Amino acid sequence: MAESIENSHFLLRRLHSLLGLVPVGAFLVFHLWENSQSRFGASHYNGEVVAFLQGMNYLSIIEIAVIALPLTLHAGYGLLISTQMRWEPRRYSYLRNLLYGLQRISGIGILGFLVLHIGMTRIQGLWEPAIRADLYAHMQHLLIQPLIFWLYLIGLLLSVFHLANGLATMGIVWGLTASAAAQRRFGYVCGGFGVLLALIGIQGMLGFLP
């Protein structure tokens, strides 16, 4: 019985890490690149980027099957892990333990940010057609408000950290970086990837500002 539970946990951990990379992490990268197109102005963003996405066949099915469902599974198991973790940063002050705790905390923060972001864009757009018609103007209206801007910036940085650190952790979980040296080298790669992604995301936010 104990062995069966352990095997289930083993498989769930790998499914959890895999979903965090594909499709959830891949979607984050695409979404930040998509928003970075804001630097070309409203006509390009609305006329090219948003129009292309809204014109996709079966968009709602894709959003549910490829984004919402994997994200829900990843977040649900992540919350379960968070309730079971024993994080003692003062007793175990090494970097990997610190990053483990920050990964769990950032995941909870991201869930709060997603409720805010989806509520003010996707859901609000269901009964306000003007948002769908001019998403650029709507995002500009949101981000010129200092509180919303800082909440978005924090949400962005939490999301990027969660993906970059999750990618480094995935290398350990899947046995791809077995030695301490390999983990350290791959950690630098993931850190660089996170910085690049954060810069792209910040550029996208600033592109909406007047």
Image (cartoon, grey):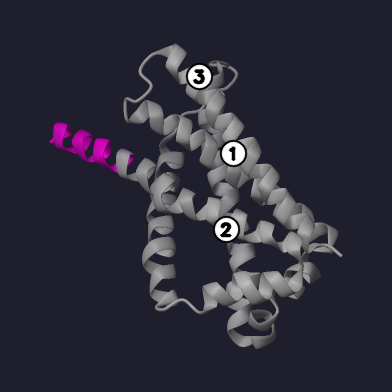
Figure check: 85 above or below 35 = above
**What SS does tag 1 mark?**
helix
**What SS does tag 2 mark?**
helix
- C-alpha gap between disc 3 and disc 2: 27 Å
Judging by the rendered image, the residue that carries numbered circle 1 is 161
Q: Position of residue 35 (x, y in %)?
A: 65, 60
Three-letter code, disc 1: Phe
- C-alpha gap between disc 1 and disc 3: 17 Å
Three-letter code, disc 2: His
Q: Position of residue 116 (x, y in %)?
A: 64, 63
Within the image, what quadrant is residue 38 found in? bottom right
Within the image, what quadrant is residue 36 found in? bottom right
On the question of residue 97 being in view, the answer is no
Mark 3 or mark 2: which comes first in sequence?
A: 2
**What SS does tag 3 mark?**
helix
Report the magenta residues as a range: 1-13
Judging by the rendered image, the residue that carries numbered circle 3 is 185
In the picture, measured across the screen, residue 193 lies left or right of residue 18, that is: right
**Residue at coordinates 58% horizontally, 51% vertically from top-left?**
110
Mark 1 or mark 3: which comes first in sequence?
A: 1
Of the two numbered discs 1 and 3 in the rendering, the one whose residue sits closer to the viewer? 3
**Residue at coordinates 41% horizontally, 37% vertically from top-left?**
84
Graded by Cα atoms within 10 Å as few (under 14), some (14 to 19) or many (20 or more), the crowding at tag 3 reads few
- C-alpha gap between disc 2 and disc 1: 15 Å
Judging by the rendered image, the residue that carries numbered circle 2 is 31
**Residue at coordinates 35% horizontally, 18% vertically from top-left?**
178
